[in-house]
Amino acid sequence: MKAIATVPVHNPATGAVLTHVPSASLEEVDAAIGRAATAFPAWRAVAPGDRARLLRRFADLVDAHAEELALLEVTNAGHVIGNARWEAGNVRDVIEYYAASPERHFGLQIPVAGGIDVTFHEPLGVVGIIVPWNFPMAIAGWGFAPALAAGNTVVLKPAELTPLSALRIGELAVEAGIPPDVFQVISGKGSVVGWRFVTHPAVRKVCFTGSTEVGKGIMAGCAEQVKRVTLELGGKSANVVFADADIELAAARAPYGVFDNAGQDCCARSRILVERSAYDQFMALLEPAVRGVVVGDPLDERTEMGPLISPSHLEEVSSFVPDDAPVAFRGEAPAGPGNWFAPTVLAPVERSARAVTEEIFGPVVVVVPFEDEAEAVAIANDSIYGLSGSIWSQNVGRALRVARAIDSGNLSVNSHSSVRYWSPFGGFKQSGIGRELGPDALGAFSDVKNVFISTEE
Ligand code: NAD
């Protein structure tokens, strides 16, 4: 028998090898996709109430193992324990939320002449879900929960760097009674496993979260078979602070809008735009807030920011802060082993600088002044991305006006909230196509069929 190839996975806070996981070959991926295709007819035929019951049992098991899952995210992804607990709870909540939907996936009855006309939401078949390393288990759940609820079978590929939580969730699904071939987690390379989801004809939809660069290739590849695709890609979101905001609150919260998860967040508000008349006051308040961010051991309950994911990512983030970078101030980070980078504020910066235009995906933020509302909107929209953003103002009319004017999928006013599983999440422009979460997610995992029944024959 051929030996299974394995690769090491690391703890980003220490560099230590945690374990080894399989790295699937092309033959193994094909076999898994084949099993998922074979399992599809029986899974789609499971009565909606029974599918709902299985998903509820799955959610209960995730809940029972929430601390274990959180600890996997701490050790494998460097997430701080408070965030990791929230993420395990999010997986549970998302499964539970979509467990309610098989029984409520209503079609329409449309008034027509000569008969009745009804629509059905048919599952697509095998769905391939490709997950990045920054929120390994939460993003997995946003894909597999609605996909399974809609009656599809799922093959899911975690990121090479962070496969542990998804692999464990796959085991919990089986324990909950979901047939093993209905939901398979396959660890391996993007270029092998992920790309096979794109090229294999039995995979009818690819749900990809990751970089804009890889996402473009996925979209082009899916076009070959007119394969359905959802893309959740990069971001360079703006945190717009008007002079009429509660400046103290805006400055106190700004670090957490960008440095959460060490800035490795597609929704990171990595451009802070401040109305010029409030700029000096804001910067004076931002400095102690940034210096106060607690960076260190992700297992310590007091820690607010952990390490970057890998040595190569540390190098990439560092390239945005060369020796002559305009550093206004920085926080602290541990020395020694692990991929540590201190929270860093760059100002003043040229509008064309790389740090202003490119996604850094690390704890680096630029601060840019603006003169008035029109300029704030123009700067916020001066990006190829459009994922998220915040508006700080006590003028409700202005806040809503600016929220409507910014070309972004997820905006928050006087808050940095982006992801709430009850509401749709996704990007404008090169931040993606399609929406996850919210009441309509099942629509992304099914096709509408229209049936006319004559009453005249
Ligand atoms: P990445 O694009 O390098 O990898 C993402 C996933 O795609 C991984 O599982 C990887 O193995 C796989 N992959 C890589 N090459 C592939 C290929 N040729 N074919 C198929 N699959 C392939 O991204 P990353 O570095 O893991 O994640 C960081 C990026 O993800 C950032 O740009 C971030 O903004 C984005 N992101 C977006 C969202 C969102 O919801 N919009 C959420 C999280 C992360």
Image (cartoon, grey):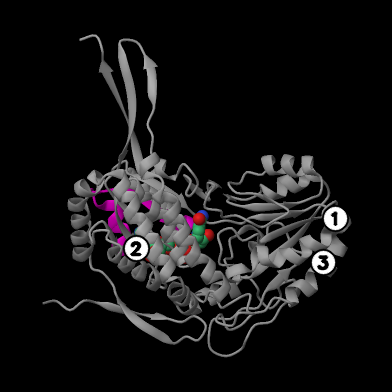
Assess whether mark 1 and mark 2 are in contact (beta carbons under 8 angstroms): no
Horizontal side, residue 391 vs residue 43: left or right: right
Position in image of residue 230 (x %, y %): 42, 48
- Regarding residue 221, the answer to whether it shows in the image is no
Q: Which of marks 3 and 2 is in front?
A: 2
Q: Which of marks 2 and 1 is nearer the N terminus?
A: 2
Can you identify the residue that label 3 sits on? Answer: 283
Kind of residue at badge 3: Met
Q: Residue, x 39% and y 51% (percent of image)? A: 99
Judge from the rendering whether residue 12 lies leftward or rightward of residue 287; answer left or right. left
Q: Does residue 192 sit above or below 76 in this rendering?
A: above
- At label 1, the amino acid type is Arg
- Label 3 vs 2, first from the N-terminus: 2
Disc 2 residue: CB within 8 Å of ligand 1: yes
Task: Determine which residue is flagged by label 1.
Answer: 276
- Ligand 1's quadrant is bottom left
Q: Is residue 141 toward the left or the right of residue 86 in the image? A: left
Calculate the distance from the C-alpha at mark 1 to the C-alpha at mark 3: 11 Å
- The residue located at (75%, 45%) in the rendering is 399
Front one among 354 and 52 = 52
Residue at 30% in and 10% down: 114
Residue that mark 2 sits on: 157
Segment colored magenta: 190-212
Residue 394 to residue 26: above or below: above
Q: Callout 2: helix, strand or loop?
A: strand
State the image coordinates of residue 39 (x, y, percent, origin top left). 20, 52
